[in-house]
Image: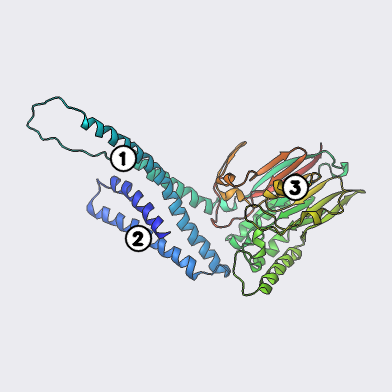
């Protein structure tokens, strides 16, 4: 990794040197010391992160997150600069080829007392400026994504038309949160504000679709009081995500890992959330009912498959509408569509929209779509629907650029 950092810095340094030509020697030395000093500090920081900062210590874990984020932001921004400089080098290469063949061609005799001067193909000052400007803009955008985007909660209103919906549930409102990742939070006031935004919508039901923590149950301790404020008259239902099992941290024993999971399940119950672990519930209004199914994490592509949808689905044949809480959207195509045609809507999260992308009107793009076909918003196939929540929290990069934290409010309508 250190070698990659140095190679990136060497490449970008060529553009920096070009733009420093007109500055004094002293200025060039100061800029050089600052530039390469930052490289050295980044390599030292990376070594420190992986060797001296245990992820299981909450305070140190937050420091680790911000240190990693700082290094990531700097170098991903430099990669953007490298891409522009690479375009410049391609142009220079073809110019060199052209000049080579031109010099090899026979030249007419010219009487002159001047000796020919060999000239190289210089780097474009315009593209060098463009490269550094692009990198700087990206660096600023990623920084702003931490300062503002991390807690810039957006309420999204979605109508779900369901052909078998009993009239007693027509117009019912469901609120969904996903991917809280309480171990990453650094602004408790902002988190509280997000919950207050949700409660202003006065939902009839509430769904949470997994990843309450990053690694360990104690991460949620300071936020139990805040999330306990989420109430809904027809029920608050939750399930687990891949991060909730403690699979991404080291344990002294299997018993400690089991205890951590039990403590996390206990946190759901303390907050008043009815956690569904391969189970279902019936919600009744004036004699009519619908089913709420919830399974443990089931993910394709190497993610854990703890969930048992067959178990949760058992004895639901008399329920006219079935709503499924399943953390990973890949579960929809993996099991729901091919084997459970009577599940009307699946509610998921997991992707976070990678916390990075673009959404303008109906257009949306994020690098995460290279991995997930369904990664944000509403998807339909036949009579079945999937909604992928963009997540309430964040992990890894402690911010969001373009893909903002989401509070979803669904309205059920009879088709």
User: Residue at label 3?
Assistant: 336
Residue 288 seen in the current view: yes
Q: Residues within 10 Å of mark 2 (few under 14, many from 20)?
A: few
Q: Nearer the viewer, residue 170 or 7?
A: 7
Q: Nearer the viewer, mark 1 or mark 3?
A: 3
The residue at which mark 2 appears reads as 37
* x then y, percent, for residue 171: 81, 42
The quarter of the displayed image where residue 3 is located = bottom left
- Distance from label 2 to label 1 (Cα)? 25 Å
**Quarter in which the C terminus is drawn:** top right
Q: Is residue 66 left or right of residue 83?
A: right
- Residue farthest top in this picture: 108
Between 174 and 372, the one lying in front of the other is: 372
Of the numbered discs 2 and 3, the one sitting upstream in the chain is: 2
Q: Secondary structure at mark 2?
A: helix
Residue 367 falls in image quadrant:
top right
Q: Secondary structure at mark 3?
A: helix
């Amino acid at each position: 990794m250190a070698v990659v950092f140095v190679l990136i810095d060497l490449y970008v340094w060529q553009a920096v040197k070009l733009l420093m030509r007109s500055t004094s020697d002293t200025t060039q030395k100061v800029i050089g010391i600052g530039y390469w000093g930052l490289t050295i500090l980044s390599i030292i920081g990376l070594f420190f992160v992986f060797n001296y900062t245990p992820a299981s210590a909450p305070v140190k874990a937050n420091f680790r997150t911000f240190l990693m984020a700082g290094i990531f932001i700097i170098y991903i921004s430099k990669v953007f600069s490298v891409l522009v400089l690479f375009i410049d080098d391609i142009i220079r290469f073809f110019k060199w080829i052209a000049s080579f063949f031109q010099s090899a061609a026979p030249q007419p005799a010219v009487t002159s007392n001047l000796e020919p001067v060999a000239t190289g193909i210089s780097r474009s000052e315009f593209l060098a400026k463009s490269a550094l400007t692009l990198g700087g803009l990206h660096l600023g955008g990623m920084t702003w994504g931490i300062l503002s985007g991390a807690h810039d909660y957006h309420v999204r209103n979605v109508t779900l038309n369901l052909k078998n919906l009993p009239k007693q549930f027509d117009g019912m409102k469901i609120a969904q949160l996903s991917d809280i990742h309480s171990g990453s939070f650094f602004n408790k006031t902002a988190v509280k504000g997000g919950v207050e935004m949700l409660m202003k919508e006065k939902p009839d039901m509430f769904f949470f679709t997994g990843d309450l923590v990053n690694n360990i149950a104690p991460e949620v301790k300071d936020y139990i009081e805040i999330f306990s404020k989420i109430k809904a008259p027809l029920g608050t239902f939750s399930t687990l995500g891949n991060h909730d099992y403690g699979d991404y941290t080291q344990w002294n024993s299997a018993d400690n890992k089991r205890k951590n999971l039990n403590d996390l399940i206990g946190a759901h119950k303390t907050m008043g959330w009815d956690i569904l672990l391969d189970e279902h519930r019936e919600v009744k209004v004036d004699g009519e009912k619908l089913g709420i199914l919830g399974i443990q994490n089931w993910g394709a592509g190497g993610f854990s498959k703890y969930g048992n949808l067959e178990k949760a689905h058992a004895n639901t044949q008399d329920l006219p509408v079935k709503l499924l809480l399943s953390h990973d959207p890949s579960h929809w195509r993996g099991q729901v569509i091919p084997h459970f045609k009577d599940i009307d809507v699946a509610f998921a999260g997991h992707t976070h929209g990678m916390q990075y992308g673009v959404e303008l009107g109906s257009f949306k793009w994020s690098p995460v779509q290279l991995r997930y076909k369904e990664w944000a918003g509403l998807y339909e196939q036949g009579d079945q629907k999937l909604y992928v929540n963009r997540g309430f929290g964040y992990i890894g990069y402690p911010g969001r650029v373009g893909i903002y934290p989401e509070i979803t409010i669904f309205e059920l309508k009879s088709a």
